[in-house]
Image (spheres, rainbow, N blue to C red):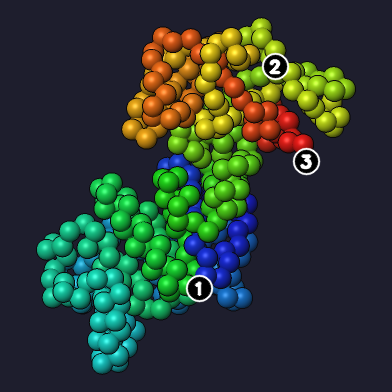
Amino acid sequence: MLRNISLEVLDGELLVLLGPSGCGKTTLLRTIAGLEVPDAGAITLNGADITMWPPHKRNVAFVFQSYALYPNLSVFENIAFPLRAVRHPRAQTTQRVTEVASQLGLSEFLGRRPRQLSSGQRQRVALARAIVRNPALFLMDEPLSNLDAKLRTNTRRELLRLQRRLEVTTVFVTHDQIEAMTMGDRVAVMSNGELLQIGTPREIYQRPTNTFVAGFIGSPPMNLVPAELTVSKTSRFYHQGGRTWSVPAPGIWSRLAGPYTLGVRPEDIRLAGPDLATIRGVVDLVEDLGCEAVVTVASEGHDWQVRCPGTAGYLPGEAVGMLVSPHRAHVFDVTGAFAGMLSEPTS
């Protein structure tokens, strides 16, 4: 179920709908395509109200997660199917299919059946079938989810280059935040049928609108730790486990004293000796990724994940301190909404 979705997709942009399974991404995509009818509101495309138009009149191309190719037809016939369905002239159909197949590297496979193709090739056929119509809008429902990791990365790059070249407005659904952050001109984060935040990948990463977005975006995600803030005229105090961290505070923060959630990205924490930092803990896990390591630090009943250079050499059981720059620490109120940074940097 969708709840009061208001969304504008800009001409030529690639907008990514991102969220966990069941949040309404595919329902929204199907509503745009005309496969679902909204209870209220309107859907417009290039200025025309298409809310009640049947799917075949919307000039919208839908790429499904399952490819949905016709197994008894050749690659050529699969790509040509949308044109033949509207009785496009035969010579023009052949020319158009040949052009699109060449763009996607499918020319040598036009005579094959889908079962003779790899997963990546079948995905490209599904894309070609959508492109051949010259649609006003692409709708893509997790089109890369059936591919293995390496092929998924390569196909993602191919798809992004293709969209940039064709400049076709595209709405792309995924639950993979890496896909969303690397592909989208803008990202719309959804949960429980609601649109929580929309913005560029950098905007959403740096200024999440609430704790859900903060915890969903990022790998590892943002550290979210309960905190208590008290404020004087000149300082703000963050309390955890009996220890107090004092930072300079603008006067406007005097109204924000009370329980909050502190949010800090793993890369915004620096590990040091336990005597050099107010926030202290013990290394619990070390995930060595080669160029970097993700270190999990247990502190006062909470786990903090920290990005470190791969050469840092921390070991489980080692006592450490965590240094956090106050202007990189997010503060969320009791409702989970973003309230501001712990300290704004001085100009």
- Find out whether the residues at labels 3 and 1 contact each other: C-beta distance under 8 Å: no
Compared across the picture, whether 225 is left or right of 219 comes to: right
Q: Give residue 105's mark.
A: none
Residue found 26% across the figure and 77% down from its top: 102
Instruction: Say which of marks 1 and 2 sits in front.
Output: 2
Asked whether residue 65 is in view, the answer is no
Snapshot quadrant of residue 10: bottom right
**Secondary structure of the residue carrying numbered label 3:** loop
Amino acid type at image mark 2 = Trp
Q: Residue 5: percent from the left, percent from the top?
A: 60, 53
Q: Callout 1 environment at 10 Å: few (<14), some (14 to 19), or many (20+)?
A: few
Residue found 74% across the figure and 35% down from its top: 344
Q: Residue 119: percent from the left, percent from the top?
A: 21, 57
Q: Give residue 347's mark.
A: 3
Q: Nearer the viewer, residue 254 or 72?
A: 254
Instruction: Say which of marks 3 and 1 sits in front.
Output: 3
Q: Callout 3 environment at 10 Å: few (<14), some (14 to 19), or many (20+)?
A: few
Instruction: Say which of marks 3 and 2 sits in front.
Output: 3
Q: Nearer the viewer, residue 248 or 37?
A: 248
Extreme front residue here?
311
Extreme top residue here?
242
**Secondary structure of the residue carrying numbered label 2:** strand
Q: Earlier in the sequence, mark 3 or mark 2?
A: 2
Compared across the picture, whether 87 is left or right of 340 comes to: left
Q: Residue 279: percent from the left, percent from the top?
A: 60, 15
**Secondary structure of the residue carrying numbered label 1:** loop
Amino acid type at image mark 3 = Ser
Rendered view: 146 above or below 275: below
Q: Give residue 245's mark.
A: 2
As measured in the structure, the alpha-carbon distance from the residue carrying label 1 to the one carrying label 2 is: 59 Å
Q: Callout 2 environment at 10 Å: few (<14), some (14 to 19), or many (20+)?
A: some
The residue labelled by disc 1 is: 53
